């Protein structure tokens, strides 16, 4: 998987919309996708693969997103499966969403439950979609994320294919 693809995978995993600049810091060098007015990078992020770094178990690197808020992810290599037959990224576990507090989760849950309880025979899925979207924004959902990952083309360098969170 390329660094460009990994950037979009992280966008999916954290529910971000690719609205801010980012950088990977790996072995003392910065990598990322260039956007007009942003940082310049020497290497093409779609040509640099994660495998090219020859990571070993417990190696670490960082990913910073949104230079104003300084969301810094420490990424650690847990295991390397060279004989894996998986062709799609897969999330095994997760906890919480960025900027999502327990209060936000409770509020979104209550609003969604209230919408369901107050529904009637005329209520459609579309009528409660906004409540579901808000719930998904603040509550980590591994199964939903894996459905998104399965349907996204991470291997085509396309900066505008959009991040569709509606699945």
Image (cartoon, rainbow, N blue to C red):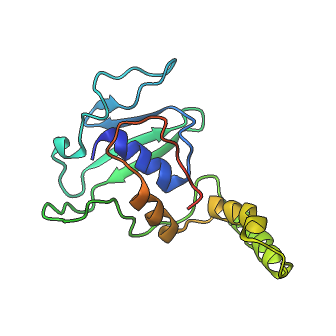
Q: Which residue is at 18% across, 65% downward?
A: 84
In the rendered view of the protein, which quadrant contains the C terminus? bottom right
The location of residue 109, given as percent across then percent down, is 73, 72
Q: Is residue 128 above or below residue 99?
A: below
Work out whether residue 15 or residue 67 is closer to the camera in this orientation and state it.
Answer: 15
Q: Is residue 9 above or below residue 120?
A: above
Q: Is residue 125 visible?
A: yes
Q: Is residue 103 visible?
A: no
Q: Is residue 68 left or right of residue 72?
A: right
Q: Is residue 146 above or below residue 159?
A: below
> What residue occupies the far front of the structure in this picture?
122
The location of residue 160, given as percent across then percent down, is 49, 35
Q: Is residue 121 left or right of residue 83?
A: right
The location of residue 10, given as percent across then percent down, is 44, 49
The location of residue 27, given as percent across then percent down, is 25, 36
Q: Is residue 159 above or below residue 119?
A: above
Work out whether residue 101 or residue 148 is closer to the camera in this orientation and state it.
Answer: 148
Q: Is residue 62 left or right of residue 130?
A: left
Q: Which residue is at 23% across, 63% downward?
A: 79
- Looking at the rendered structure, the number of numbered marks drawn on it comes to 0
Q: Which residue is at 35% across, 44% downward?
A: 5
């Amino acid at each position: 998987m390329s660094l460009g693809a990994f950037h979009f995978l992280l966008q999916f995993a954290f529910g971000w919309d690719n609205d801010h600049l980012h950088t990977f810091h790996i072995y003392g060098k910065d990598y990322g996708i260039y956007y007009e007015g942003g940082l310049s990078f020497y290497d093409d992020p779609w040509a640099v693969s994660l495998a090219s770094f020859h990571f070993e178990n417990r190696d670490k690197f960082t990913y910073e997103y949104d230079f104003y808020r300084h969301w810094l992810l420490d990424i650690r290599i847990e295991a390397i499966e060279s004989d894996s037959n998986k062709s799609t990224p897969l999330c095994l576990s997760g906890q919480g969403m960025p900027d999502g507090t327990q209060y936000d989760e409770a509020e979104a849950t209550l609003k969604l439950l209230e919408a369901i309880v107050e529904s009637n025979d005329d209520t459609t899925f579309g009528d409660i979609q906004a409540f579901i979207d808000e719930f998904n924004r603040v509550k980590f959902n591994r199964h939903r994320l894996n459905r998104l990952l399965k349907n996204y083309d991470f291997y085509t360098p396309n900066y505008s294919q959009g991040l569709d969170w509606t699945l």
